[in-house]
Image (spheres, grey):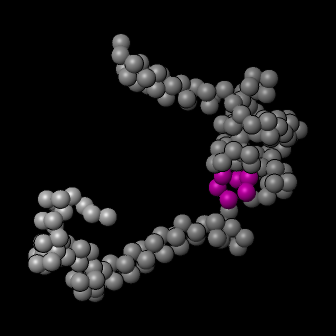
Amino acid sequence: MTPHRKCLVLGILLSLLLPVAVAFAVTPDEMLSDPKLESRARVISQELRCVVCPNQSIDDSNAPLAKDLRVLIRDRLKAGDSNAQAIDFVVERYGNFVLLKPPFQLNTLLLWLAPALLAIIVLFQLMRFLRRQQSLPASEGFDSVEAESRDELSADETKRLREILEKGPTS
């Protein structure tokens, strides 16, 4: 097997094992003995963001803080909290940032509208650029380099070129 093929096979195996590695974020010692409570805890854990890992739920994260939050959620469920109460408990301490889908409120308005605003700005700049390119005369646009390269050499330039080709460059 060639080294190139070995790398390809290794890459495929690693990509197949990645989902399995994520599944091990919740360790057996965290899991609750009651399957219904455990399933509720997993649903809640998938809705909460790990504040250490970028855009990863605490259910998928191996960070120590994510583990602490998973244990906290399970403790709240064992104490009799509803899903909403357990989530509110965490949000009260970490803010809306801990939610993977933060609510649409005045303080999260920029978070929700930023992608649309950014897209509008990019489209506006692109339109300005295209209009500017269309209004430029040929001598100022991209075609000017091409036009200059098609011009004939002057008599002096032709003479100088012949000298260089015959004798070599002079300093």
| Residue 91 rendering spot, x and y as whole percentages | 79, 54
Q: How many marks?
A: 0
Q: Residue 144 appears in which quarter of the rendering?
A: bottom left
Please tell me which residue is depicted at 64% across the width and 70% down the height of the picture: 110
Looking at the image, is 35 positioned above or below residue 55? above
Looking at the image, is 141 positioned above or below residue 80? below
Residue 99 magenta: yes
The residue nearer to you, when weighing 3 against 111, is 3
* Magenta stretch prevailing secondary structure: loop
- The residues colored magenta run 97-102
Please tell me which residue is depicted at 79% across the width and 36% down the height of the picture: 64
Q: Residue furthest top?
A: 1
The residue nearer to you, when weighing 43 against 92, is 92
Looking at the image, is 38 positioned above or below residue 137? above
| Residue 39 rendering spot, x and y as whole percentages | 69, 33
Quarter of the image where the C terminus is located: bottom left
Q: Does 18 sit left or right of 10 as displayed?
A: right
| Residue 4 rendering spot, x and y as whole percentages | 37, 22
The residue nearer to you, when weighing 128 against 35, is 128
Please tell me which residue is depicted at 43% across the width and 78% down the height of the picture: 124
Quarter of the image where the N terminus is located: top left
The residue nearer to you, when weighing 98 against 75, is 98
Q: Residue 42 appears in which quarter of the rendering?
A: top right
Q: Residue 62 appears in which quarter of the rendering?
A: top right
| Residue 36 rendering spot, x and y as whole percentages | 72, 31
Please tell me which residue is depicted at 28% across the width and 83% down the height of the picture: 140
Q: Is residue 73 visible in the rendered structure shown here?
A: no
Q: Does 127 sit left or right of 139 as displayed?
A: right
Q: Is residue 157 visible in the rendered structure shown here?
A: yes
Q: Does 86 sit left or right of 2 as displayed?
A: right
Looking at the image, is 32 positioned above or below residue 122? above
Residue 161 magenta: no
